[in-house]
Image: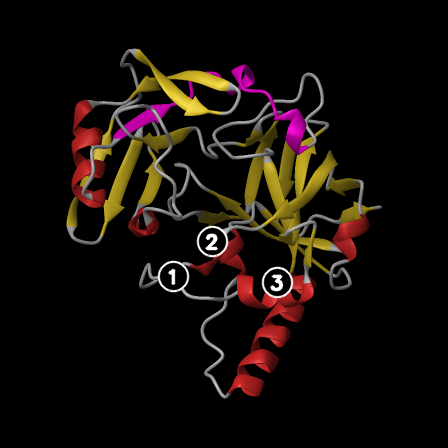
Amino acid sequence: MILSEIHVYPIKSVTGWAVDRAHVHPWGLEGDRRWAVVGPDGDNLWLGEYPRLLAVTATELPAGGLLLSARGLPDLRVPPADGPSVPVGFTGLDHAMLAAPEAHAWFTELLGVPARLVWLDDPARRSVDPAHGGLPGEVVSFAWDAPLLLITTASSRRLDEWIEQGAAERGEASGARSPLRFRPSVMVEGAEPFEEDTWREVRIGTVSFRVSELCDRCAVTTIDPHTYRKGKEPLRTLAAHRRWDGKTWFGIRLVPRDVGEIRVGDPVIAG
């Protein structure tokens, strides 16, 4: 097996970037989800409720900060966050640092609701939730339940086959499908479909990871990344083939055991 893709999401819930290499920290990939968009009360403005977040691309600037782009809005350079610490509503995290005011205005205009951009100055402050397989000392950025999410191309292809088969049986168009709807950190080529369900340890190149849990999937996967509209797939098909314990499942969550660099093409060993 080999590592076929790496994706980094600079701001939680916005469009990610494909990169050919990334440094692995205890809390996740370098530059991954250190920023988040919150409401006035500090609660996360969730992609499932605000699909237009997918219109945003965020590029890290060499001197720190971000370049924000979205169709219909002027590009905005956001300097490194140096605002006050404010309350936020993330599990295991009670405060984060405010970005510059112009970033708040930009996201408010984009979403049509009051919004603020915040920075997680020290991701070692946030523990992986024990309810999602976290162990003492494990930490995570603004990513939800684990530092990384892994999916395999074989499982993605099998799901596409199921979706196409179901659409044909119903006389429907199969519709656009993309593994990026699952917002993976890493994708692995060469496994058998859903072989990853049985893995407990994964090694990518020289970096080892612990599998903390299987990943249960939510309505975010049903958002078309081009139109920002919600549909029925892939959750409808996952529910038919991959539903147990009242949830649908696709992919696995990883917690780094080591730090180091991973590269596209690295060998992957799992078991």
Q: Disc 3 to disc 1, how far (Cα)?
A: 16 Å
Q: Amino acid at mark 3?
A: Ala
Q: Is residue 216 above or below residue 190?
A: above
| Residue 45 pos. (x, y %) | 34, 37
Q: Amino acid at mark 1?
A: Lys
Disc nearer the start of the sequence (2/1): 2
Disc nearer the start of the sequence (3/1): 1
Q: Are marks 2 and 1 in contact (CB under 8 Å)?
A: yes
**Which residue is labeled 2 in the image?**
219
Q: Disc 2 to disc 1, how far (Cα)?
A: 8 Å
Q: Quadrant of residue 214?
A: top right
The magenta stretch is 116-132
Disc nearer the start of the sequence (2/3): 2
For label 1, count other residues whose C-alpha is less than 10 Å away and answer few (under 14), some (14-19) or many (20+).
some
| Left or right: residue 228 compared with residue 237 | left
| Residue 227 pos. (x, y %) | 31, 63
Q: How is the image coloured?
A: secondary structure
**Which residue is labeled 1 in the image?**
230
Q: Disc 2 to disc 3, how far (Cα)?
A: 12 Å
SS at mark 1 in the image: loop
| Residue occupying the point 68% across, 27% down | 134
Q: Which mark is residue 239?
A: 3
Q: Is residue 64 visible?
A: no
Q: Amino acid at mark 2?
A: Ala
